[in-house]
Amino acid sequence: MNRSALVLLAAPFLVLVSTRTACGQDACSKPRLISVTGTAEINLPPDEVTLTLGIETLDRDLAVAKSKHDGRSKKVISAALAAGVESKDISTTTLSITPEYSEEKVPRFLGYEVSQTIEITLKDLPKYETLITKFIEAGVNRVRDIDFHLGAPQKIREQARAKALHAAKEKAVAMAAELGQTVGKPWEISEVNPTWGGLNLQSNAVSGYAPPRTNDSDSTVAPGEVSIRASVYVSFLLE
């Protein structure tokens, strides 16, 4: 048999060997896994509150309205600074001046309304009630929003995520043991996306709109909590 014939006969054998090898590798790419989700939730009292306050001043004389408004704004900012609020935690919006008219059939000119919003973040929560009163006395005539939250939620998010991973490992070990199996190293790890539904990571979600409790027995505020939740998906190798 000549050299050409030997090469032709060997070709089908090489194809067969390559096919079998590929199938073997494919089988090895599908390990025995156990997949679980782990969830955890941490509830803490808020340690900061952001107040969004409105100052609205009306007068038929624009100069008078502007002067009164400036005086009130300065008093509010001074009260915040005197209470220990840092200047970086105080911000104001652009001043707005609008002519106001009555809602009668023939509208009457009521005056010029000068308005502005001041946002103040308070980190010393026991001063909350006292400061609210001082702000109103200084000239605030509209409380637009009160947001109780955690000042640094990232560390708590990491703790919740770690607890969720620990819960996933415990669940996988318990489920595998019921079937006489042993859990090995993790194969896949991912955080559950909120858009998938189910449990997910949430922050700054105040449960029961209320500030934390103060030491004053006559306080009218009640404690609240911020809930931070985490959910993870983990696949473990079975040994």
Image (cartoon, rainbow, N blue to C red):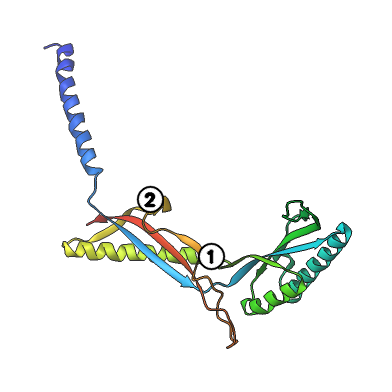
Which residue is the extreme one toward the front? 105
Q: Residue at 27% of width from left, 61% of height from top?
A: 172
| Residue 186 to residue 136: above or below | above
Total marks drawn? 2
Between marks 1 and 2, how big is the CA–CA gap? 23 Å
Q: Residue at 46% of width from left, 65% of height from top?
A: 228
* Spot occupied by residue 231 in the image (x, y as percentages of width and height): 39, 59
Crowd around label 2: few <14 · some 14–19 · many ≥20 (10 Å): few
Residue type marked 2: Trp
* Spot occupied by residue 202 in the image (x, y as percentages of width and height): 46, 60
Depth check: give the residue in front, 85 or 118.
Answer: 118
* Spot occupied by residue 78 in the image (x, y as percentages of width and height): 78, 72
Query: Quadrant location of the N terminus?
Result: top left
Which residue is the site of mark 1? 153
Which residue is the site of mark 2? 196
Residue type marked 1: Pro
Foreground tag (1 vs 2): 2
Q: Is residue 97 visible?
A: no
Q: Is residue 222 left or right of residue 34?
A: right
Q: Is residue 229 visible?
A: yes
Depth check: give the residue in front, 34 or 226.
Answer: 226
Which residue is the extreme one toward the left? 1
Query: Quadrant location of the C terminus?
Result: bottom left
Are discs 1 and 2 less than 8 Å apart at CB?
no
| Residue 141 to residue 22: above or below | below
Depth check: give the residue in front, 130 or 168.
Answer: 130
Q: Residue 12: which quarter of the image?
A: top left
Q: Residue at 76% of width from left, 76% of height from top?
A: 82
Looking at the rendered structure, the secondary structure element under dot 1 is: helix
Looking at the rendered structure, the secondary structure element under dot 2 is: helix
